[in-house]
Amino acid sequence: MRLKHIDRIRGIAILCMIQVHTAAIIPPEGITVGHPVAFISASIGGMAAPIFITISGWGIYRSAKRRKESSDGTKSWVSWILPRVFILTFCQLLVNISLNLERGGRFFWMTPGVLTLLAIGSIFGPTLVKLSQKGKISFLIIFLLIPTIMGDLNGSNLNWIERVSSVGIFEWIERLVINGTYPAIPWLAFIVLGSLIEDYGSNLDEVDVKIKIGLLIIIASMVYSLYEEIPWALTEGEAVLTFFPANSMFLFTSGIFVIILFRILQGNEILGGKPAGGHKLSWLEPAGRLSLTIYVLHFVVLGFVAYSMQNSPRLEIYLAFFTTIAHTVIWIPLAILHEKYIPKFSFEEILRKFN
């Protein structure tokens, strides 16, 4: 059974990612890191990737469970894993080429990213279905603690160019696994989190207890930030929460907010009722069902924008804001039209053939 709240969460995730990526390509004039607009944009961006990866982990786990039920042979698993790794890696290359640094973009052609992380998550899928719930929780805790244990090995001293570049296969693997933009260690935490959300299912009371405990810890981190007079959250630098690299407190905090989003949007659907908002939020669903395709295509659009804006002055704040919102919102009707006229033409449809 296809759950509507899952498609809606995917829709929110992809729209948030479009917003933050567009804002990064066309930043408005006069906006500094400390500006409220910049903080809001960074907050959306900070949550977009955890939501997107968690919901993808949920999907990987569900698909792996179906494969395990039908066949548990090595050949069957290889035929399930390889197409996913190939398609996701191919999509990552399309993203990198579209938004290449040499044409005003942000990546080199070989830069590992979110989609190569999901490819690793697919490889991890067969292990997830064999682990008990306690085993998954143990893995999640390990991934949460790893950034603290690793210290500077996670690339905290790397600038952006160093983080997205690599010289030779060994450095590329290093970026893929421990110190790139979305390295497997520790970002696989969200893949595991997606599997646990599926496992807990309708056990809502236990989920609510964990949310309350998590929120208390987050509030404590804010109090610590005020007491020590250090920023609570920064994209990178010295703060309680950092995104590049993702530290332990960021992983924990964003994970709790992802769980809260799931908890809110599922409504009563998990118990056989309706998702939150009933039919009113159904407009999010087509974009959610097309999230991978939209993820790739919006980078193609941004690649053209980045190339055309090289050496150009920044846009005024109102024009930049309007452009960012317009580029984000336009994907909603496009997804609806796609679903109506060419539903079989997408990367999702290709992946679906290998479930």
Image: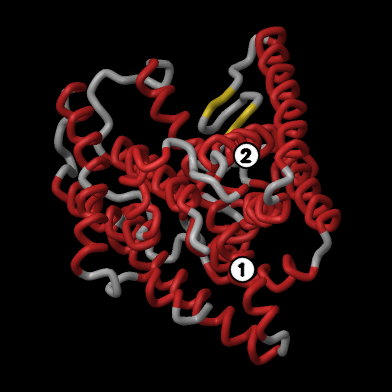
**Dot 2: within a 10 Å radius of its alpha carbon, few (fewer than 14), some, or many (20 or more) residues?**
some
**Dot 1: within a 10 Å radius of its alpha carbon, few (fewer than 14), some, or many (20 or more) residues?**
few
Q: Earlier in the sequence, mark 1 or mark 2?
A: 1
Mark 1–mark 2 Cα distance, whole angstroms, equals 35 Å
Estimate the x, y position of residue 228 in percent, counting from the top left. Answer: 71, 11
Which of these two is toward me, 257 or 174? 257
Nearest to viewer (mark 1 / mark 2): 2
Q: From this viewpoint, is residue 250 visible?
A: yes
Q: Secondary structure at mark 1?
A: helix
Left or right: residue 205 compared with residue 112: right
In the image, residue 266 sits, relative to residue 191, either above or below, namely: above
Check disc 1 and give the amino acid type.
Phe
Which of these two is toward me, 40 or 2? 2
Check disc 2 and give the amino acid type.
Ile
Residue at 57% from the left image edge and 24% from the top image edge: 233
In the image, residue 68 sits, relative to residue 207, either above or below, namely: below
Q: From this viewpoint, is residue 50 visible?
A: no
In the image, residue 244 sits, relative to residue 94, either above or below, namely: above
Which of these two is toward me, 334 or 278? 278
Residue at 35% from the left image edge and 20% from the top image edge: 37
**The quarter of the displayed image where residue 227 is located:** top right
**The quarter of the displayed image where residue 292 is located:** bottom left
Left or right: residue 146 compared with residue 179: right
Residue at 70% from the left image edge and 31% from the top image edge: 211
Q: Secondary structure at mark 2?
A: helix
Residue receiving disc 2: 259
Residue receiving disc 1: 170
